Image: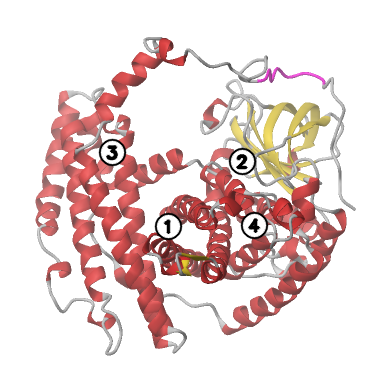
Amino acid sequence: LGRFRLDLVHPPPLPADEDVQRGEEFLAKLRDFCETKIDGAVIERDARIPDDVITGLKELGAFGMKIDTKYGGLGLTQVYYNKALALVGSANPAIGALLSAHQSIGVPQPLKMFGTQEQKDTFLPRCARTDISAFLLTEPDVGSDPARLATTAVRDGDDYVLDGVKLWTTNGVVADLLVVMARVPKPADGEGGPDARGGITAFVVEAASEGITVENRNAFMGLRGLENGVTRFHRVRVPAAHRIGPEGAGLKIALTTLNTGRLSLPAMCVGAGKWCLKIAREWSAVREQWGKPVALHEAVGSKISFIAATTFALEAVLDLSSQMADEDRNDIRIEAALAKLYGSEMACLMADELVQIRGGRGFETAASLEARGERAVPAEQLLRDLRINRIFEGSTEIMHLLIAREAVDAHLSVAGDLIDPDKSLSDKARAGAQAGVFYAKWLPKLVAGPGQLPRSYADFHPSGHRDLSGHLRYVERAARKLARSTFYAMSRWQGRMETKQGFLGRIVDIGAELFAMSAACVRAEHLRAEGDHGREAYQLADAFCHQARIRVEELFGRLWTNTDDLDRKVVKGVLGGAYEWLEEGVVDPSGDGPWIADATPGPSTRENVRRPIG
């Protein structure tokens, strides 16, 4: 809507002293464990997290970080949970994924938000100390479109009977408890009682139940210690008491769980950025070319500046979003989605720049470096490990559409019928009158604002520090420009707006940059006020904002000057076979087999590779 609401985040919400003390005490224990008990090279070599490491994390309480103390958990805030994930993820990202999948999207989070008291009493103490949980939504033919879910749960007395196949079940190979999304058939009229609604429904399922087979442990280009598999359900009986929420609420539960669960990924991206900065600093200071350290060559120095400034901004976005989640004062689904989107994209860029800074050594594995007598720096591993974050828990493309839908929701609620081709002329007339009233009041507000007043945001230009107030004025002006661009696009394309995914993606990317700029400035001012590296924080925020402004201006230009229409024509040609001649001259090393595995329900014909820990 073009309203820059700095008051929502400045001054930033802060954790209570008790939460800080509890969080810092745990971080100290976790750091000692990471330094003395975790060998990331062994996990990378063996493609498995050792059982004693997982057992040690259980004893430390790491599986109950987000679970309330009354259930045996640590009761950490979202802020400190994310700090813990960043720390343990830096030791090995697969461990971060293990802990995150368990309590960000596994059994604890949906039960915390939607479970009955009996379910919480039964399962949360187990999740806090002994049991590992997994979240099962994706299927071989169902990715980002869960409405096509094929796994079924048929009511049979006091039980449901589950049949189907789930793919990419993170933690599924070692899990004790599963959150399973399945489709309950819609009952015939008058059947099944008042609770029988049908639809996608969530269940807590014991992983050792009869009829459950883990048919494969999947292997990936990164996260080699990930216990991710294919799980088949054949006539698996689940007590109705283990259903989470009512029938048909599964999709809402899954999406709501992901709202704050998505903050775990940018947490590990922040950890990756910090490590990239450390290695870039140390290496670039000792590596000399043409008589001086490579860091002092502008081509390399600009990469180091990008890594430093972006890490600062990512941590600002993460901490701000996490504190807002802890405060529970506002709906943060857009902030969490932006943090996930921006963090996963920028972390990959930082890791790629680190590999480039390291040159040939960046492409060489840590094991090979060590074998020939050099420091075992796993830069190429980090690049591989981070790549999945652009796909996990909502791909970049899906996040663009999800956030864009939220961004234009206010307009759709006002003018939705006006641009709906299926609505009658009378409906369009009523919508037009309603929209006219709204836009007559709203559009004039986009003409001018605080961003045009030289003294606006003066708090961010303290004596002796860089001037950040100019960046916030830019954010305010750009927010209004973004709203004008969105309104113009809706006027131009109307009902076809949802097909303009390139445009919508750029709109969201601009919003992400503006959010990150705001968070960076707020964090810098907070650190200055607290007397904690304030001058350096202002320098980093200033550098980041200048870098971000260049990206924003490019994105604004590409809203209207792009190759989207031409690209669509080329794609039609590719799919129609017009360019098959271009594929000549190579061989295809791919194996045989279907593009998508058969997921027909039925008994398993494969060995159960489930491997419970402890």
Q: How far from the left and from the top, in percent, is residue 168?
A: 67, 36
Using a 10 Å C-alpha cutoff, classify the residue at mark 1 as few (fewer than 14 neighbours), some (14 to 19) or many (20 or more).
many
Provide the major secondary structure of the magenta segment: loop
Q: Secondary structure at mark 3?
A: helix
Name the outermost residue toward the right.
Answer: 614
Q: Which residue is mark 2?
A: 246
Task: Report if residue 414 is visible in the image.
Answer: no
> Which comes sooner in the sequence, label 3 or label 2?
2
> Which comes sooner in the sequence, label 4 or label 3?
4
Using a 10 Å C-alpha cutoff, classify the residue at mark 3 as few (fewer than 14 neighbours), some (14 to 19) or many (20 or more).
many
The amino acid marked with disc number 4 is Lys
Q: Residue at x 19, y 29 (%)?
A: 427
> Which comes sooner in the sequence, label 4 or label 2?
4
- Given residues 384 and 253, the one toward you in this image is 384
Q: Which residues are magenta?
A: 597-603
The answer to whether marks 1 and 4 mark residues whose Cβ atoms lie closer than 8 Å is no
> Which comes sooner in the sequence, label 2 or label 1?
2
Indicate which label's residue lies in the foreground, 4 or 2: 4
Specify whether 41 is left or right of 20.
Answer: right
Q: Give the total of numbered labels.
A: 4
> Which comes sooner in the sequence, label 1 or label 4?
4
Mark 2 vs mark 1, CA separation in Å: 28 Å
